[in-house]
Amino acid sequence: MVGLLLLLLLLPFLLYLAAPQIRKLLSSGVCTSTVQLPGKVVVVTGANTGIGKETAKDLAKRGKFICFRVPPVMIRARVYLACRDVQKGELVAREIQTVTGNQQVLVRKLDLADTKSIRAFAKGFLAEEKHIHILINNAGVMMCPYSKTADGFEMHMGVNHLGHFLLTHLLLEKLKESAPSRVVNVSSLAHHLGRIHFHNLQGEKFYSAGLAYCHSKLANILFTQELARRLKVKSELIRHSSFMKWMWQLFSFFIKTPQQGAQTSLYCALTEGLEVLSGKHFSDCHVAWVSAQARNETVARRLWDVSCDLLGLPVD
Ligand SMILES: *[C@@H]1O[C@H](CO)[C@@H](O)[C@H](O)[C@H]1NC(C)=O
Ligand SMILES: *[C@@H]1O[C@H](CO)[C@@H](O)[C@H](O)[C@H]1NC(C)=O
């Protein structure tokens, strides 16, 4: 009896001691790519905290010495932190500049809960940059009480899915022109619990904060696959003149540190030869299974059309 009580009392302490080991076990995936990004242009959404910040930091580090100059100069990527809160973003940008020595870490305003802000971001970006080589759709909201975006979309669907969908659409031509280029979508294991209820896409008939997140993450996967399908058809028609790579990543963010969580994003953005796996879902730096719903092409196609419709984009 006393033993049991003691054990119960000690349990939190033991768990605390074992946490580093548990973490290690769960973080098997590490991105070991040594790919450098001199002169590349990178955009990371939601880059002012957590996984997005670690991802941006790692990408900002990767550079090459240009040796015909004396003294040789290190050329790195230009990394855009696309954030809702510009002030916070600036603090993070300065931190990344200090840690990496890369001065070209820039902050731009992007509120994914407002299509006006998304369009303004894209317009500004397209005007100031000739290329975009890596887009990391990382931002996301989770477990919000019922609320709507500026355009009247349910918050999870609106930010996690429709917001990134619009952003990707607006940058798509530039991404193609900049090929080889990559888009990485951050999803989650939570998609397994997700369902696409077309009659209740905006959660007006029924709503659960936890499930809304899962639905939006399922939508992310359906989109990536549908887009990979569409790009394949198109690029085969134009004989692979542009080849794009659509990658998926998934993370279990409760236990992993942000740095560990960033590994699969980095793996998908950097590893050479991943093109053949375009549209696939990755976990711990490996291709991972997705749920049956996430493999349903009918649902994917319909969600694509509905999303274009909601966003006022031409359905093709
Ligand atoms: C993910 O990829 C699709 C394209 O496959 C894109 O349209 C979508 O906006 C991206 N972002 C997210 C978070 O789903
Ligand atoms: C795809 O989903 C639809 C609607 O939920 C369902 O009727 C259909 O049987 C599914 N198809 C496959 C191949 O699972």
Image (tube, helix red, strand yellow):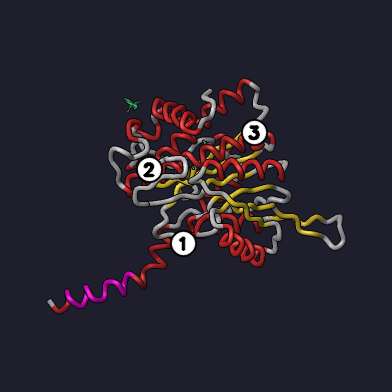
Q: Is residue 12 magenta?
A: yes
Check disc 2 and give the amino acid type: His
Give the number of the disc on residue 173: 3
Disc 1 C-beta below 8 A from ligand 1 = no
First of labels 3, 2 by sequence position:
3
Instruction: Work out which residue is located at the far top of the displayed protein and give it.
Output: 237
The answer for how far apart the CA atoms under marks 1 and 3 are is 35 Å
Q: Where is residue 22 in the image (x, y as percent from the top left)?
A: 38, 63
Check disc 1 and give the amino acid type: Thr
264, 151: nearer the viewer: 151
Check disc 3 and give the amino acid type: Glu
The magenta segment is 4-15
161, 26: nearer the viewer: 161
- The residue at the point 68 percent across, 47 percent down is 41
What residue is disc 2 on?
191
Q: Where is residue 122 in the image (x, y as percent from the top left)?
A: 62, 42
The answer for how far apart the CA atoms under marks 3 and 2 are is 29 Å
- The residue at the point 44 percent across, 45 percent down is 149
**Circle 3: is it few (<14), some (14-19), or many (20+) Cα within 10 Å?**
few
First of labels 1, 3 by sequence position:
3
Magenta region, main secondary structure: helix
What residue is disc 1 on?
257
Where residue 3 sits, quadrant-wise, is: bottom left
On-image quarter of the N terminus: bottom left
The answer for how far apart the CA atoms under marks 1 and 2 are is 21 Å
